[in-house]
Amino acid sequence: MPRLTSSHSALAGFLAAAAATHFLAPRPYDAMVPRSLPGSPRTWTHISGVAELAVAAAVANPRSRRQGGLAAAALFVAVFPANVKMARDWSDRPAPLRAAALGRLPLQVPLVWWALKVAGKAAGK
């Protein structure tokens, strides 16, 4: 029986869905933008949404899948500081929200692994 979705399709879908939320509901992302970045948090929210969309397209395209997987891994690493900021900012929130914010931190590891696995499969490894 064929699989309903492949790993690369699921990763591309995950990235595209995340990208869409940067434009449909940007306020939570604005709050996660580290203050040390220059310019408006909304600009960074939109830039990261565009980046996720571009990486999703690269992962979905067989010709660029390897590079897209590597870019996805880099993107997941690059957003880690925002997740750390969120965990710090939410330290005084109710326990379920604190748990969600802290849960984002270790979640980056399997996301990076997933992206590298997609890149490796695309390279024939």
Image: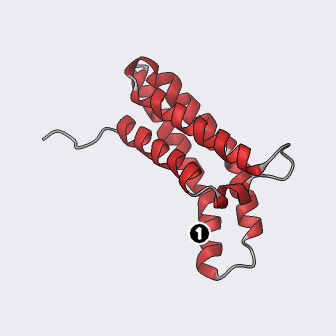
Above or below, 76 relative to 106: above
Above or below, 42 relative to 56: below
Left or right position of 55 against 40: left
Above or below, 63 relative to 100: above
Residue at 46% of width from left, 20% of height from top?
64
For the residue pair 92 and 1, the one nearer the viewer reads as: 92
Residue at 41% of width from left, 17% of height from top?
63
Name the residue tied to disc 1: 100
Q: How many marks?
A: 1
The three-letter code of the residue at mark 1 reads Ala
Pointer 1 local density, CA inside 10 Å: few below 14, some 14–19, many at least 20: few
How far across and down, in percent of the image, does residue 25 sit?
57, 58
How far across and down, in percent of the image, does residue 7 sit?
36, 39
Q: Quadrant of the C terminus?
A: top left
Can residue 93 be seen here? yes
Residue at 72% of width from left, 71% of height from top?
90
Give residue 62's quadrant in the image. top left
How far across and down, in percent of the image, does residue 59 sit?
45, 30
For the residue pair 104 and 86, the one nearer the viewer reads as: 86
How far across and down, in percent of the image, does residue 79 sit?
67, 46
Question: SS at mark 1?
Answer: helix
Give residue 47's quadrant in the image. top right
Can residue 125 be seen here? no
